Amino acid sequence: METIKLTINGVEVKVNRGTTVLEAAQAANIYIPTLCADPDLEPYGSCRLCVVEIEKIRGLPTACTTPATNGMVVHTETPAVNEVRRTSVDLLIANHPMDCLTCRQNQQCELQQVTAHLGITERRFPRTDQAFPVDTSNPFFDLDRNYCILCAKCVRTCDEITGINAIDLAFRGYSARVATFGDKPLIESTCKSCGECMVRCPVAALTPKETRRPIHEVKTTCPYCGVGCQMYLGIKDGQVITVRGDRDNEVNGGHLCVKGRFGIAEFVHHPERLTNPQIRKNGKLAETTWDRALDEAAARLGQYAPNEVAVIASAKCTNEENYVLQKLGRAVLGTQNIDHCARL
Amino acid sequence: MTFAEIQSRAKAEWAALEHGDKPRILIGSATCGRAAGAKAVLEATNAALAQHNLEANITEVGCIGPCYAEPLMDIIKPGRPRICYSQVTPEIVPWLIEDYIINDNPHSDLALGTIGDGSLDGIPRLFDLPMLKPQVRIALRNCGTIDPEEINQYIARDGYRGLVRALSMTPEEVIEEIKKSGLRGRGGAGFPTGMKWEFCRKSPGTVKYIICNADEGDPGAFMDRSLLEGDPHAVLEGMLISAYAIGATEGYIYIRAEYPLAIDRLKIALRQMTEYELLGDNILGSGLNFHLKIKEGAGAFVCGEETALMASIEGKRGMPRSRPPFPAQSGLWGKPTNINNVETWANVSAIMLRGTAWYASYGSDKNKGTKTFALAGKINRTGLIEVPLGISLKEIVYDIGDGIPDGKRFKAVQTGGPSGGCLPASQLERPVDYESLTEAGSIMGSGGMVVIDEDTCIVDVARYFLAFTQSESCGKCVPCRLGTKQMLNILENICQGKGKVEDIDLLLKVSQQIKAGSLCALGGTAPNPVLTTIRYFQDEYEAHIKEKRCPALVCPELISYYILADKCQGCGICLRACPTEAITGGKRMVHVIDQSKCNKCSTCLNVCPDRFGAVVKVSGEEIKVPKKPVPITVSKPDTYTQR
Amino acid sequence: MTETELKERLTEVLTHYTGQKNELIPVLQAAQEQFGYLPAEVMQEIARFLRISESTVYGVSTFYAQFKFQPTGKKKVRLCRGTACHVRGVSRILDEVEKQLGIKPGETTSDLEYSLETIACFGSCALAPVMVVGNNVYGRMTPKKVAPILDGTEQ
Ligand SMILES: Cc1cc2nc3c(=O)[nH]c(=O)nc-3n(C[C@H](O)[C@H](O)[C@H](O)COP(=O)(O)O)c2cc1C
Ligand code: SF4
Ligand code: SF4
Ligand code: SF4
Ligand code: FES
């Protein structure tokens, strides 16, 4: 791939052709505030916070949509640029609830971050707000449009990443909003509750119902299916309370489905969850050790002819586990009756 | 049939029509003509002809321009000049038929002027009249003269010869020719057309599109509608020429659904072009393939913006996107695309027919050719005009438009629609060209020109435009979606007398940031009406804010109605008419308006007999009137007893 | 209208289209022409026909002012809110129409006879103010002309 050189705030940056000015700045550790850019999504250019000055280009182009070109000279912090950013943020906070301390997104809110970055400490515009009812229909997360800044990350995610298109922008102008078909509650839409939209929402418009924050995180593989998504379990008081996809992992690139994202804490701590093997004796299940359970299984399987045995793998098995299981079936039990449940 | 054969047949037909022995009657039947009653005139004409057993060739033509004089009817008697009659009503039609067609009395009192060769005593030549003399017809060359539903009439007037000429040149030569003509886009921004074509031609790719922008969303603009209703082929020929020059094989006409007549006429035109092999594969045997589709808009002003327009054709929400990539690199369905305005295309066909030197002889240095304007508002002669660029605003308002009606004072002329600005009397000497209007804080825009008089409140006008852009903002980007809302709120407050002194500064500041920060030109130009009105009429803003006074007596919250004790005759008309029962009174009693109940509907002012003139409208002042109805003490005015 | 009737009429509309995504707006326009507005079931059926999501159909249809989601009256009364009409006092015509019909812009009379709408601009500015009833355009309107036009007794 062809590399090009550009100058950002006097620093020379080398990037591949096709990189945006924003990505080039990020590669050089130069901070440009953003609210609508996401590395997983196509450039959109709606929040106007990433405006920069580029020599020989008219006006204030947005870094997130402008491709870097060879020899480009970019300035990211000029008075003109900061005026526009400041006005955009002023306008957004005039249209946004101001209950930061009790907000679910407090300290994780990207609008807070850019407000701080720009040093805004007072409101310049009178409040403009529309009172939207909160959609709490989804069991795992809420949609509160009063906080929404219309970055469209959620609808773009549901289109570009999941392909579900359960939500889209509806109406236009000041009345524009994130909507399902016919403005029905999320739960009545085609939403699969994957929460991919929620994790990208920069503000508190899409937030999980679980509001506690973990003390530390543990990296693991999702136990639900064979894909092998990598995730971080957030732990507090010995309990799993949050789940976060691992962006750096090649298998899932941070994406998770509804089961991985919202189904783990509950089943891990479910009172009926089996934590030890059990053996049925006289119609009654009794707890036992792994060694005794395996011995028992081996002994019983040995009582059958090979074609009397079938092996069915669980959809929770990884590829490696599936391999080992079919090997057990073919090489040890000698059966060709091998299948996979492939559903959960 | 070869094109030469088509052409000679069309010319022969036209000659037969022009020099035939039947009278011809042309009725201006564009949407404006129809709104003024052209259909009734047509029916009356048919009836009158039938009554006298007369035969005539009736043609429904497009708009020749002077809409104020609609309905328009032209009569051409064999061997006589063409006479244009104005304000023709169904009642007048039988006279014209009897008196002129039968008895040869041309009724010069009803005639507006003669058109073309020949003259008649007592009737001026139409194009010598002050309203038409400064005009030059290039884009509108056929409007009002040919039947827009007859391709042969267009061809008879040298239509499609520009295309034939273009096909005999290389595409590069055609582009060079357009570049040399100095033609700039008539859709608003004035980008050089030839250059735009060149970018698109040079973009790699075999599939390319061209699009005709007929969205004409500016409130107050109707040039493109008139052109498409009056002479669709002039536009379509331009598109064919461009398709050849750029190497496009497919095109779209994006037209607003509010223009049903223009859409019908385009459909007819496309059908006729296909019959003559001017559309489809191997056009005129030249190897050029070109297919055209009509796409109807669905009511969104922002879809006039080119990237939004393309999104709309693709079936999406019409939201603009950032450039680069430019449409010429990646437009419709990611293919190189060239978009031009209706009028731009109509100029292209004229330039290819008559050459660049001819075209460039009109207009000024950087602004070649002509521009059409829709003249409307508080002006005597409303209508569609076409003038050489560089003409002054004054000539347009006073010579062509004949100034302001009812002896009122000129206040401002609004150019460029919601993206433009209001220019006051001090700017009237300004030449109308792209740079000069921008320098004055307005823009050329697509050609809407609305005249405002002293009875129009300038703050209300700014509020009106902001209300428009605010409701038409697509909502994608923050400065436009929320900034126009804030601006509108401030302007509404000022109009309601709730303005604060700081508001003017705040408006100026936000305006600058919205202009600088918006994604597309809708937001980028939305503050212009506010900026220009503050620039030229700050005192009027201040009157609203500091004195709670609307000098034009428009803003309802700032005006009051009073019944003058020395004029009221106690007739009770106003009392009965008041919708909110705010008026009390009685026989021979001075009537009184309860200010707390009055909703400023102005009914009392309108119904109070002129001879009494007892109701007054004021702003920022209080008139001393009785608190309660009191007996009338003054005698009846003389005028009353005299009548 | 029964559900089967609605389905049949929609199917007829859809036969004129090939089912490509970019036909969404023309299909919505044709459906609205057929039904007077866009019932939810119609939009859902269109989504299936074009193989796009229902929310996309909703997002697009709500973007454009032309599309209506409630039944509209037999006669559409539309007033121009264009600049020229504004300056020439269309708001007084609007007041009069509102008074005559008892509805506000965007509403329909309860007997489903009339709907009232305002339109950005009809492009007949030279004849401002302009009112359109059905397909008839009335220029140079005055409040007095409103009632006769609405009850069909105008000259
Ligand atoms: C909000 C907005 C509305 C526009 N509306 C129109 C329109 O109705 N007709 C038009 O020709 N151009 C319109 N334009 C300009 C077009 O984007 C584009 O510049 C033009 O069609 C190019 O054609 P031209 O080079 O022939 O002028 C609009 C631009 C904006 C930003
Ligand atoms: S949870 Fe998943 S499917 Fe549901 S709206 Fe969000 S991204 Fe779409
Ligand atoms: S809900 Fe969140 S992600 Fe979606 S548009 Fe609003 S702010 Fe953006
Ligand atoms: S400037 Fe306005 S119309 Fe243009 S993209 Fe932004 S919100 Fe949409
Ligand atoms: S991050 Fe670039 S415009 Fe929002």
Image (cartoon, coloured by chain):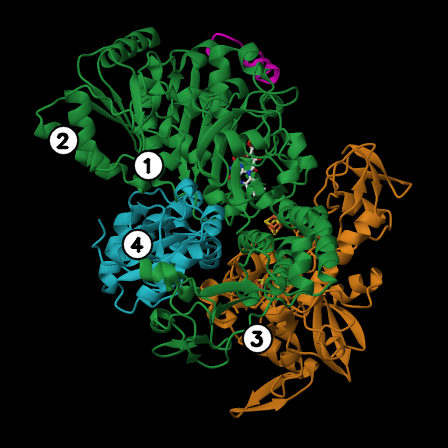
Chain colours: A orange, B green, C cyan
User: Between disc 1 and disc 2, whose residue precedes?
Assistant: 1
Comparing labels 4 and 3, the label whose residue is closer to the camera: 4
Residue at (51% x, 91% y) in the render: A283
> Is A140 left, or right, of B129 in this rendering?
right
Please state which of residues A313 and A41 is positioned toward the viewer in this rendering.
A41
Mark 2 in CB contact with mark 3 (< 8 angstroms): no
Mark 2 in CB contact with mark 4 (< 8 angstroms): no
Q: Which residue is mark 1?
A: B33
What residue type is disc 1 on?
A: Gly
What residue type is disc 4 on?
A: Lys
Q: Quadrant of ligand 1?
A: top right
Identify the magenta region. Answer: B167-180
Residue B487 sits in which quadrant? bottom right
Quarter of the image for the N terminus of chain B: give it.
top left
Mark 4 in CB contact with mark 3 (< 8 angstroms): no
Q: Secondary structure at mark 3?
A: loop
- Which chain is home to disc 2? B
Comparing labels 2 and 3, the label whose residue is closer to the camera: 2
Q: Spatial distance from mark 4 to mark 3, Cα to Cα?
A: 48 Å
Q: Which mark is residue B48?
A: 2
What residue type is disc 2 on?
A: Ala
Q: Residues within 10 Å of mark 4 (few under 14, many from 20)?
A: some
> Is A104 left, or right, of B299 in this rendering?
right
Same chain under badges 4 and 1? The reply is no
